[in-house]
Amino acid sequence: MTAAQSRKLAVFPAFHKVAGRRVLVVGQGEAAAAKLRLLAETSADLLLFSPLLDAETGADLVRVGGRWIPRWPEVNDLTGAALVFVATGDDERDRTTWQLARAAGVPVNVVDKPELCDFYTPAIVNRAPLAVAIGTDGVAPVLARHVRAKIEALLAPAFGDLAGLAERLRARVAGTIAGADGRRRFWAGFFAGPVAAKVFAGRMAEAEGAALEALARHEKGTGHVSLVGAGPGASDLLTLRAQRLLQEADVIVYDRLVPDDVVSMGRRDAERIYVGKARGAHAMSQSEIDNLLVRLARAGKRVVRLKSGDPLIFGRAGEEIAALREAGISFDIVPGVTAAFAAAAEAEIPLTLRGVSSALVFATGVDADGETLPGWAGLALKGATVAVYMGHAVAAKVAARLIEAGLSPATPVAVIGNASRPDARASAGRLDELHRIAASPEISGAVLIVIGEVVSESAILANPAPLAALAAA
């Protein structure tokens, strides 16, 4: 048998309509009670056939609102039923009931007898009206239960609320949006965007309002912009929400430090627009980027504005948010792993440490005029850990300003370049050595400087070599 043949299913997954229809359980004891508990998740009319009724099965029958018929079934009892479950514990009785079900043309499941089963009972994750069924062709039910537990953890109960809201809006969407492609795009945004976020936060009224607003925007041909954090570079640090939005985007507008393999996660036919900015070399000015986002959204596009790290940390997201608000364009923000967190994790620097530092400062090495910012020096003097973004070119000025302000020249510092990427490099030393460390040719790309006593706990200082290749550690 070839590998492809071995992956062929022996059963075809399907969902039976049981609402208001008779479903029979034949037998008593734990196996019959288990079937009753499973069927309690449905709106079927449950009948239990058995001459005797033990306490456990009776209690479950009462709880699920089923009826007890104190005898074994006959063929007329089975005719027209949706399903039959057999759990008598007696081989002869099981086979007799199986034959009756076959004669009545009703699908039958006989517990622990796969050869007498027309169907198998899956492990079910119930998020009604959403349901997930996990089956193993009847050969490994325990495995199915393990998988169900994992899916239960992934699917919050609010998924059912989200599906219910979609069900209520389905006719309205169908009547408003012409064409399957347009409806697909609407539902893709519905299930992964702001509407879903509000449902998961328990704000159902707001979620319904947001869905109606989205439908109105779609009717007017207006798009949506997502400001998405791409993280520090490693593609596996991208959030699941960011991945979903990339797959749904019509246009991806991306920055210089976003790696190609992250951009390539977007939908294959999505338009890609590079707007990267480096010191002294801008593909587009910020105002041009703002206008581009508004223009694309007004053309009905779903836009992902992909930014390195986190959009709200030195990503100029504030200006883009203001432009989108002024233009009346809907948007949402997806956070990303910022460079300070990635660099600290890789270099094993605890950014806060009991008894050493209880404050963390994110700072940028230059202000809008290109001069070193001194405003956070006082916080460093009080023991805060300072993470300096974009400080590579001004490291010497940063060190001089801090020492001038009174910070000890022996304060530990670390310089990390290209955190989370294969070419990540780092070095550590004293504040009065910062200019020399940052000037090392081995450290390049996106550079982050960490200043504070917490650096003394880092993996870099534990390495006798002056430069550590983090990716190889």
Image (cartoon, rainbow, N blue to C red):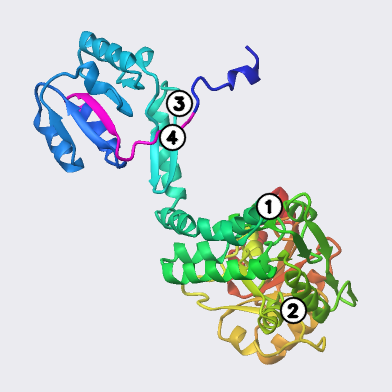
What range is drawn magenta here? 13-31
First of labels 2, 4 by sequence position:
4
Q: Nearer the viewer, residue 155 or 220?
A: 220
User: Is the residue marked by circle 2 packed among few (<14), some (14-19), or many (20+) residues within 10 Å?
Assistant: some
Kind of residue at disc 1: Asp
Q: Nearer the viewer, mark 2 or mark 4?
A: 4
Q: Nearer the viewer, mark 3 or mark 4?
A: 4
Residue bearing mark 1: 181
Q: Residue at x 33, y 21 (%)?
A: 108
State the SS at label 3.
Answer: loop
Kind of residue at disc 4: Phe
First of labels 3, 1 by sequence position:
3
Residue bearing mark 3: 136
Residue bearing mark 4: 15
Observer able to see residue 307: no
Kind of residue at disc 2: Asp
Q: CA distance from mark 3 to mark 4?
A: 16 Å
Q: Residue at x 82, y 86 (%)?
A: 370
* Label 3 with label 4: CB-CB less than 8 Å: no
Residue bearing mark 2: 432
Q: CA distance from mark 3 to mark 2?
A: 64 Å
- Count of marks, rendered view: 4
Kind of residue at disc 3: Thr
State the SS at label 4.
Answer: loop
- From the viewer's perspective, tell me whether residue 176 is left or right of residue 33: right
The image quadrant of residue 86 is top left
